[in-house]
Image (cartoon, rainbow, N blue to C red):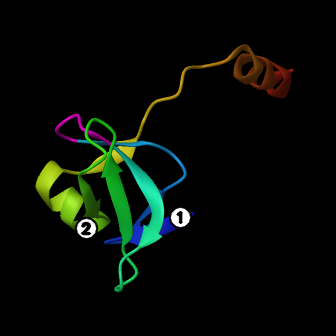
């Protein structure tokens, strides 16, 4: 699922890393206002609405994924 936060599209299907280094994952639940509920992966008891989490922990970005051989192959094939 993708959501919009202040004009920025956020893909909730991936782990998000906040500016403070904390890692968050969508719980697949929404608040009454329609905000995504995010669980802290270091302490899953901490669940916050996405806007509150960003205010308290800083901007977020998707966690980097390791580059796979299939990704390299796709790039090389596209340039051939």
Q: Which residue is mark 2?
A: 51
Discs 1, 2 touching: Cβ within 8 Å: no
Q: Going 34% across and 85% down the picture, which residue do you hit?
A: 33
Q: Going 49% across and 56% down the picture, which residue do you hit?
A: 12
The correct choice, above or below, for 6 with respect to 78 in the image is: below
Mark 1 Cα-neighbour bin, 10 Å: few <14, some 14–19, many ≥20: few
Residue sticking out furthest to the front: 45
Residue sticking out furthest to the top: 69
Mark 2 Cα-neighbour bin, 10 Å: few <14, some 14–19, many ≥20: some
Q: Which residue is mark 1?
A: 2
In the rendered structure, the answer to whether residue 1 lies left or right of residue 25 reads: right
Q: Nearer the viewer, residue 33 or 64?
A: 33
Place of residue 63 in the rendered image (x, y in percent of width and height, measured from the top left):
42, 35
Q: Nearer the viewer, residue 33 or 45?
A: 45
Q: Nearer the viewer, residue 35 or 59?
A: 35
The correct choice, above or below, for 3 with respect to 80 in the image is: below
Q: Going 33% across and 52% down the picture, which residue do you hit?
A: 39
Specify the quadrant that holds the C terminus: top right
Magenta part of the chain: 19-23
What distance separates the C-alpha of mark 1 from that of mark 2? 14 Å
Specify the quadrant that holds the N terminus: bottom right
On the image, which quarter does residue 62 sit in?
Answer: top left
**Magenta stretch holds residue 43:** no
The correct choice, above or below, for 41 with respect to 36 in the image is: above
On the image, which quarter does residue 48 sit in?
Answer: bottom left
In the rendered structure, the answer to whether residue 80 lies left or right of residue 57 reads: right
Residue 74's tag is none
N-terminal of the pair, mark 1 or mark 2, is 1
What SS does tag 1 mark? strand
The correct choice, above or below, for 34 with respect to 56 in the image is: below
Place of residue 15 in the rendered image (x, y in percent of width and height, measured from the top left):
44, 42
């Amino acid at each position: 699922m993708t959501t919009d936060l202040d004009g920025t599209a956020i893909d909730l299907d991936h782990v998000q890393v906040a500016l403070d280094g904390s890692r968050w994952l969508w719980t697949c639940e929404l608040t009454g206002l329609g905000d995504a509920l995010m669980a802290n992966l270091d302490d899953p008891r901490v669940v916050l609405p996405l806007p509150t989490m960003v205010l308290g922990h800083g901007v977020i970005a998707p966690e980097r994924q390791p580059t796979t051989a299939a990704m390299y192959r796709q790039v090389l094939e596209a340039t051939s």
